[in-house]
Amino acid sequence: MEEEDEVSPSQEIDFCTLGMFIIDEIHYLPPKPSVFDILGGSGCYSALGARLFSPPPLSHTVSWIVDKGSDFPEAITTEIKSWETSCLIRSDSSRLTTRGWNGYDSKQTRAFKYTTPKLRLDEHALTPSLLFSRSFYLNCSPTRCIDLVTSILRRRKTLNPGCPKPLFIWEPVPDLCTPSELLNCTNALPYVDVCSPNHSELAAFMGDPDLGMDPLTGKISTQSVERACEQLLSSMPLQSYTLVIRCGEKGVYLAKNGGRSRRPSMIKKKRPANRPRGGLTLDMDMEALFAGLLGDDGELEREVVPIDPGLEMWLPAYFGKENAEMVVDPTGGGNGFLGGLAVALARGKEIQEAAAWGSVAASFAVEQVGMPILGKDEMGRETWNGALVEERLDEYVRKARGRLV
């Protein structure tokens, strides 16, 4: 390492992403020309989603990590710094920046491959200020998700034993959304606050040969999404888990099973020694599993263990069927959605409102190739692609009125 742009140790952080930064080249079918040196990767797009709702000085509460190789374009450095985030830039002239090749076919299906060696991020990349972020975005396999969460919590506890637990927003990597990984997925759910595959990734976990699509219409099947969520959540014991399923122009499906509220119960009492990770097992101590749910008289003790009633809700996409032509490049839309959702949750919003933030963030991510353009209007207010984020959010909420509680 030659240099490291450090984040102020005193800076409070609302959002930190462990997604990778990638410089993309994108190849379309002729006659649309290819584009090169585009900011990309789940780290960049998730940071964008959080940054959209964080004008300066709030922008400094958004953090991400950029590994800068010897081939790093100066124009990208300028663009990153214009966001005024708590971006940790690590320079190493002995390696190339992580780069990716993206190609689209006639069905707008994206193919991706790395063209230079990738550099994954883990808990060791987090400086003390980033380590104590209020929320983390993870884009990884189920087993790696468990490793990252436990490692981050262990480091936080070592440095500050009394610090509250952060929020973890997990997006599974597509390649490992398979039936053979379903058990690992259920094992990972107790470690995170939100699990968010898209419709096809959820269907792949559940072994759906149609990958969440209606074979008759070729469109996303809302019934398949709802059924898969019900099947997955029904395998989880006694606690409430949140699934946020991103479904393109169909919008987003929010699903929570009823059960004890995870976060208050985790604060109030320690996990029993054999507390399960994932579904019910034969060797489970059922008495320990029910501990705290029942009072001395056998009645539910809701004051001690809050009960989440659950949730099933569809919210529309900002760019739906009626204005789908506004989607220029879907790359990064899901990552941007989760960045917006995560920072909303970190600032105390409920999951429905957080999903609204995410939907608006996704709209800015997909209406052009690469990143939206940051600017200011005649009143000095921050704009992205000439639009005010808060106005777009108000417009979205009006569109979804009646479904946002």
Image (tube, rainbow, N blue to C red):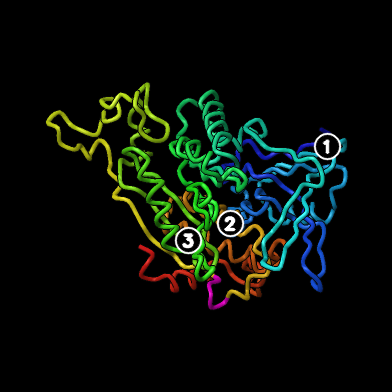
Inspect the image, locate mark 2, and give the three-letter code of the amino acid beneath it. Gly
Please give the range of residues in magenta. Answer: 319-323
Q: Which residue is mark 3?
A: 252
Residue 325 at x, y = what percent? 62, 76
Examine the rendering and report whether any part of residue 376 can be seen: no
Question: Quadrant of residue 97 in the image?
Answer: top right
Q: Main secondary structure of the magenta part?
A: helix
Q: Nearer the viewer, mark 1 or mark 3?
A: 3
Q: Nearer the viewer, residue 59 or 185?
A: 185
Q: Which residue is mark 2?
A: 334
Outermost top residue: 273
Give neighbour class at mark 3: few <14, some 14-19, many 20+ (Cα, 10 Å). Answer: many
Q: Which residue is mark 1?
A: 92
Q: Nearer the viewer, residue 49 or 316?
A: 316
Disc 2 on helix, strand or loop?
A: helix
Give neighbour class at mark 1: few <14, some 14-19, many 20+ (Cα, 10 Å). Answer: some
Q: Quadrant of the C terminus?
A: bottom left
